[in-house]
Amino acid sequence: MQRPIYLDCHSTTPLDERVLAAMLPYFREQFGNPASTSHIYGWEAESAVKLARESIAAAIHAIPEEIIFTSSATEANNLAIKGVAEAYFEKGKHIVTLQTEHNAVLDPCAYLQSLGFDLTYLPVQSDGLLDLAELEKAIRPDTVLVSAIAANNEIGVLQPLAEIGAICRSNQVLFHTDAAQAIGKIPLNVEAMQIDLMSLTAHKVYGPKGIGALYVRRRNPRVQLAPQMHGGGHERGIRSGTLYPPQIVGFAQAVSIALADRLEENARILQLRQRLWQQLSSLDGIMLNGHEHQRLAGNLNISVAGVDGQALILGLQPVIAVSSGSACTSSKNTPSHVLKALGRSNDLAYASIRFGIGRFNTEAEIDRAAKHSIDTIDSLRQARSQLGLSSIDSKQI
């Protein structure tokens, strides 16, 4: 049986063979613990981690000491948000974030809110972009942190990081960004963008699952964090736990490959996205979610009027592996909070498809995916019409 075409690269990406090759020696031959500093096995592992840390730091224009390895971007987000909240408790208890954040940011914020912190959830415009004037107005004397996602995991929209950073810096407020979807795909410069904390992960950029990192600024200003895991004093006491060299080496290799090929790869993936959109937009009642241009090259998120959302995904499944939103919320029977923030109705939010085009997709796959999507939508609308229902409800749009 032929496997479906994989177009869900915002959920995860396949491991690049070059990344696997870099990782393999650290599973068996060079298997040492980086914290074992009394013999060659530990030195080999420590050296590999050191080089990887330098590589990841260089990718975002940081210094190696500012990179803290975690198990994921989710853990990095928790460490950043809760860590700042605890460390700056005496300065203030107000945090600002966006309504369209990943749940790995929204859930820690909700947790802090349950403890008495004051949270401001900023709306976005209909194209998914933050209104910078709204951010300016939201910052107060007791604001300690602004958290704004770099590249949205559902609609791919790229927030204006440099402008957000400038506003935060002028107000002496720390700026955190979840860059899980952005690393290796768009330019990231923590100095130029005045970012104080940045969450990263490997598996969105053809690296292994189970490894992430948090950038923590060490100067101008030096960010203080309260550790969320204790025991062993690893990562300068900020995040205890034995480091995993194969994963860390794979993370660095994945980022290095992505940076080296970024311009060429983005151009090719953008061409595939436009090819898919051109074919899908030939149908009536197809709406693009998010800004037309200021988005990740591989992201195409659409809402389809006149169909049932669950039937749409089920109809696509045999041929295309796609999702209707974040993989982390796929088990919840609720409409996407991101699409609702854009003003989509419940019906349209349910009847949405997130295409995540990646490194290994081909034109032939895109054409096959487009044809099957169009056939599925037409079939569902015809079935709806036979039941005496309008195929495209103006109220739905």
Image: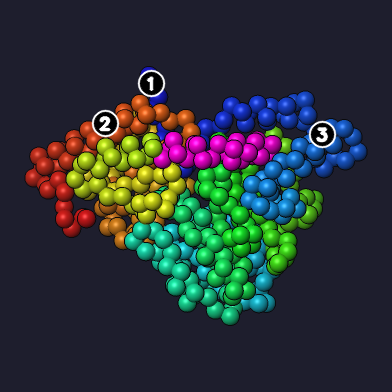
Q: Is residue 197 visible?
A: no
Residue under pointer 1: 2
Extreme-top residue of the structure = 1
Mark before the other along the chain sequence, 3 or 2: 3
Quadrant of the image containing the N terminus = top left
Name the one closer to the observer, 3 or 134.
134
The overriding secondary structure of the stretch rendered in magenta is: helix
Q: In the image, which residues are magenta? A: 247-270
Task: Name the residue rendered at 58%, 80% in the picture.
Answer: 141
Q: Residues within 10 Å of mark 3 (few under 14, many from 20)?
A: many
Q: Residues within 10 Å of mark 2 (few under 14, many from 20)?
A: some
Name the one closer to the observer, 110 or 189.
189
Q: Amino acid at mark 1?
A: Gln
Q: Is residue 115 above or below residue 34?
A: below
Residue under pointer 2: 371
Between disc 1 and disc 2, the foreground one is 2
Task: Name the residue rendered at 77%, 25% in the picture.
Answer: 29
- Whole-number angstrom distance, CA of label 1 to CA of label 3: 43 Å
Q: Amino acid at mark 3?
A: Glu
- Whole-number angstrom distance, CA of label 1 to CA of label 2: 17 Å
Q: Which mark is residue 44?
A: 3
